[in-house]
Image (tube, rainbow, N blue to C red):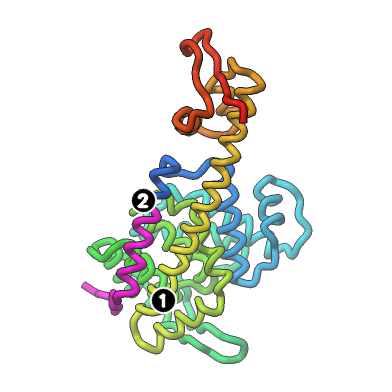
């Protein structure tokens, strides 16, 4: 079986431990998924950042408007890129990252009406250019199907930690450059899909935002891995991005939880007979999410229940 070359350094092992701990804390405090509002916000960030890396100039506000079905002024191809990415990411929870047909299906959506070869591997040679300089010449087109078959087979069967194997896949995918266009956005999306098989919360973590902020380092890590003929440098870079994305996600969750706490306290003061369902509507949280916050507020002595579920009411401590 083909085994891509890479080394798990002490730095990589340390990053794996840090990220695993962060994911554990995050999933313990969010019931595995952020709030619907945060999920939407993070998906928008993911799409905007991944396309911005490919020189799409549309902002987060533009992407939000397109998702909401509003008219947007902009270059038609850039608007099409956003619409396509929305369609592709909508399928994320249904795609199998180990199946070639799912990879081609996602590419067909991602590049619809943008390139003729959407949904199939490239038929010609392709290179990655930095201005006039070719920084990477991809393998010949006739080798792409077998190279991708080997890569998909390896990532499915490997015992390597998913944090590492997803980075290896991402790098090798960019090295092969299987499509005429859309390789960058597909590689980033497929790494997310692979990470979701380990921890589903990765569906909503916008690591692309961090990659965009360190775009030159992203290309430098690819170039270094090319020069060293292994993906170690790229693995290190992507794990650093994942760690930072998780830190920012935790901060967003804390801010969101604080807002939800305040909304519940205000609602209880306004109407001491307020129901769990009404608090769900007020906060946008699930039933378990609302009950979790109430347990926390009761534990902190901020609220108490007087009487039973029927006929009882809430008392909020005056601050």
Q: What element carries label 1?
A: helix
Q: Which residue is drawn at 55% across and 60% down?
A: 110
Q: What element carries label 2?
A: helix
Q: Is the magenta stretch mostly helix, strand or loop?
A: helix
The crowding category of the residue bearing disc 1, from other C-alpha atoms within 10 Å (few below 14, some 14 to 19, many at least 20), is many
Is 199 on the left-hand or right-hand side of 286?
A: left
Q: Position of residue 79 (x, y in %)?
A: 69, 60
Q: Closest to the observer: 145 or 73? A: 73
**Compared to 152, does 26 lie above or below?**
above
Q: What is the spatial separation of the Cα atoms under label 1 and label 2, in whole angstroms? A: 24 Å
Q: In which quarter of the image is residue 272?
A: top right
The crowding category of the residue bearing disc 2, from other C-alpha atoms within 10 Å (few below 14, some 14 to 19, many at least 20), is few
Is 88 on the left-hand or right-hand side of 267?
A: left
- Count the marks: how many? 2
Q: Which residue is drawn at 46% across and 52% down?
A: 203
Q: Where is residue 117 in the image (x, y as percent from the top left)?
A: 53, 68
Q: Residue at x 78, y 58 (%)?
A: 73
Which quadrant is the C terminus positioned in?
A: top right
Residue bearing mark 1:
234
- Magenta stretch? 1-24
Q: Residue at x 29, y 71 (%)?
A: 150
Q: Residue 24: give its label.
A: 2
Check residue 15 for magenta coloring: yes
């Amino acid at each position: 079986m083909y085994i891509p070359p890479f080394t798990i350094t002490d730095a990589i092992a340390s990053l794996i431990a840090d990220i695993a701990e962060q994911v554990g804390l995050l999933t313990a405090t969010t019931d595995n998924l952020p709030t619907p509002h945060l999920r939407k916000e993070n998906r928008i960030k993911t799409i905007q950042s991944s396309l911005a890396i490919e020189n799409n100039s549309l902002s987060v506000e533009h992407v939000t408007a397109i998702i909401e079905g509003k008219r947007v002024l902009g270059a038609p191809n850039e608007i099409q890129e956003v619409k396509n990415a929305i369609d592709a990411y909508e399928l994320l929870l249904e795609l199998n990252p180990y199946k070639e047909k799912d990879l081609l299906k996602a590419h067909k959506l991602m590049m619809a009406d943008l390139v003729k070869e959407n949904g199939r591997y490239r038929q010609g040679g392709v290179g990655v250019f930095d201005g006039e300089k070719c920084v990477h010449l991809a393998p010949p087109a006739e080798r792409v199907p077998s190279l991708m078959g080997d890569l998909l087979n390896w990532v499915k069967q490997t015992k390597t930690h998913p944090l590492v194997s997803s980075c290896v896949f991402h790098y090798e995918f960019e090295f092969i450059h299987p499509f005429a266009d859309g390789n960058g956005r597909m590689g980033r999306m497929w790494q997310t899909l692979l990470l979701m098989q380990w921890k589903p919360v990765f569906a909503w973590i916008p690591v692309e935002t961090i990659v965009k902020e360190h775009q030159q380092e992203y290309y430098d890590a690819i170039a270094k891995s090319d020069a060293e003929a292994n993906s170690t440098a790229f693995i290190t870079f992507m794990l650093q991005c994942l760690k930072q994305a998780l830190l920012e996600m935790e901060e967003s969750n804390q801010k969101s939880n604080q807002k939800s706490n305040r909304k519940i306290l205000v609602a209880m003061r306004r109407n001491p007979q307020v129901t769990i369902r009404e608090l769900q509507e007020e906060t946008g949280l699930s039933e378990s999410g609302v009950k979790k916050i109430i347990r926390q507020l009761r534990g902190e002595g901020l609220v108490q229940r007087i009487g039973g579920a029927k006929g009882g009411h809430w008392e909020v401590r005056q601050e």
